[in-house]
Amino acid sequence: MKKIFPVMSLLAVVFSSNYARAQAPAVKIQFVNATHGEQADSNIWINFSEGGAAVVAPGDGSVSYNSFLPIGTANIWNDTTGTYVSTSIFTNSSYQLSKIQNGEISISTFGGGRAYASYGAGLSTIASGNAPQIGPYPGWQPAPSPPDPTFTQRFQAFELTIQPKVVQSNGSWAFSDENQAYANLSYIDQVGISTGIKVVNPPTGTKNPIQTSHNTQTLFNAVQIYGSGAAGATLTALTNVVTKAAPGQPQYYQVAGTDPSINYSNPGSTSIANPPPITSTAAAWNVVRVAGPGTMPTDGTAAGATTVYPTWDNYITALTPGGSLNLSGTLVTNLAGSYGPTGVPAQPYAASATFNAGPVTLGSTVYTGYILISDFTFNGSPQTDLYVPYSSLTASTGLYGTNPTYSVGGGALVPVPPNNLQTLVVGDVVAGMNFGLVGSTVVATYDGKTQALADFTSQDWWSIGVLNPHLLFGGAQPTNPTFYNTYAAALQFLTSGYGFGIQDRLGANTTEFNVTLGDGSNPTLQFLIQPDVAAVPGPGTCPADLNDDGAVNGDDLGILLGAWGPCGAGACPSDLNGDGKVDGDDLGILLGAWGPCPN
């Protein structure tokens, strides 16, 4: 997930000649109602929240985003004139899909925020720059107080960045005539609506032109927690499923089970799938969202809160000397990769991470237990050691939030980790733990070496994960069911979207392409709002319909051939027989299903 840069003030950007706007071509974005009739266009709203138009500082090439500048244009229906009117599109605004001509918006530049699809109305709180609310709230019932209208809606985020390439000329930085587009599906905070991405007329070199998810019901079933059956949790209800209030009650939402007067789907139901029947939609299920671990209490310290997702305490203990994954006390996690700031070629880094018991003083505060990142070099030059206290890992912003605070050289913790080399290196450990790779004793073969996963470098991990995604999460910790991100693991083969914030270490979660002024390319980046119960690409009633257009034809054949070979991490819809690769067997299945899909 792309880092969010601070929004610059209006005066600093609009009235200062020190910042340059982009001259690159706009990228056509199309929002598509692919719900197969479950939702009318008039019931779907498109929302842009936070961030804004990109600006570049000529002095150092840094990029920031301004919410007062338009991000693009669209033809919007005007009820008064009875015509479509070309309209500037801004962040922190909502637009009814039925009033956007062809669902198309031309985005010149946008970053630092999100696009959302919502049902019923626009997300009203974004007008003041506030993101839609998911949680947490102490006690979880009622939630929130005072009422927040966006908390009573179903919505889902798309992550989108349209930003021209930054180049240097005559000692000054500016945007070039090449626009770079990045988009991904995000279920990090919640699962509310199934979504997809498709690039029409993809330019040469487009990365991941098709991304999809199973229908909403399948996603809901995968990530809900079934009471005391959840590993590492003692629960009496489905406490991560947010449902509507009971009839006649204030229209707050709550987590199912905390108020016995609120039925979950129907009396006595213990699963979204059993019942309701498959013909029901989420509205009938009484479900708004399934909340992700980063938005819920994970340590039980919030007033009235219950620990829902597994805490990281046992995993951290197992990695500390004397723990089950570090009995000898010699476990070293080797980190490696490359990093380059704006306009500078990437250079290699390397470091060693060890888990340590006992107190450490960082600034003026004493912490118990910490990760030490030492032997740290960048392009061969020594770097200052980093310290990550265990308390930073277990905080909501830590392993689940993938943004733990850390210390440089023993100083006070960095309040907000910046988007720099040190944060990247800390992120390697964080990503490795989310995947269950740190300390894994599972043996793998890669690059001529056969050894435990724990003994490979972090750079090797990402390649291994692409080649064999079954070695991630539970595959890396088969006997330790809480030593990884269980929420992201449940989504792994159901969607190509993010389950945690830096899952893109594998490179399979983001759609990317470039558009250069005058090159003749005319791509359309489609965001698909997919159904609750109808078939979508992947296993279902018509799995060979890879672009979800209701038929198996040449378009689907092209998608399958473009995915030929081993599956990467995440969803692999072209792998029709589920054997981890796209080959002749899948081609035979597709050809056998040629023609219209069954109703």
Image (tube, helix red, strand yellow):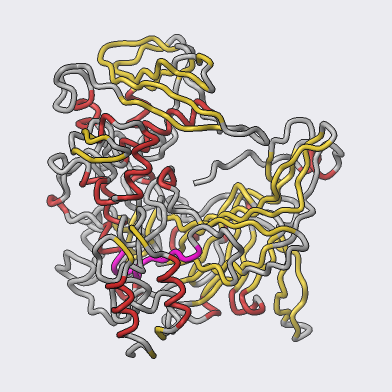
Specify the quadrant of the image occupied by residue 406.
Answer: top left
Specify the quadrant of the image occupied by residue 205.
Answer: bottom right
Residue 183 x/y as whole percent: 54, 57
Q: Is residue 377 left or right of residue 85?
A: left
Residue 537 x/y as whole percent: 37, 73
Q: Is residue 268 above or below residue 380?
A: below
Q: Is residue 320 above or below residue 222?
A: above
- Evaluate whether residue 286 shows in this view: no
Q: Is residue 28 above or below residue 589?
A: above
Residue range highlighted in magenta: 209-219
Q: Is residue 67 above or below residue 428?
A: below
Residue 382 painted magenta: no
Residue at the (36%, 31%) spot, across then down: 429
Residue 31 x/y as whole percent: 56, 71
- Along the line of sight, the residue nearer the viewer: 591 or 263: 591
- Along the line of sight, the residue nearer the viewer: 279 or 543: 543
Residue at the (41%, 66%) spot, across then down: 212
Residue at the (42%, 70%) spot, across then down: 561
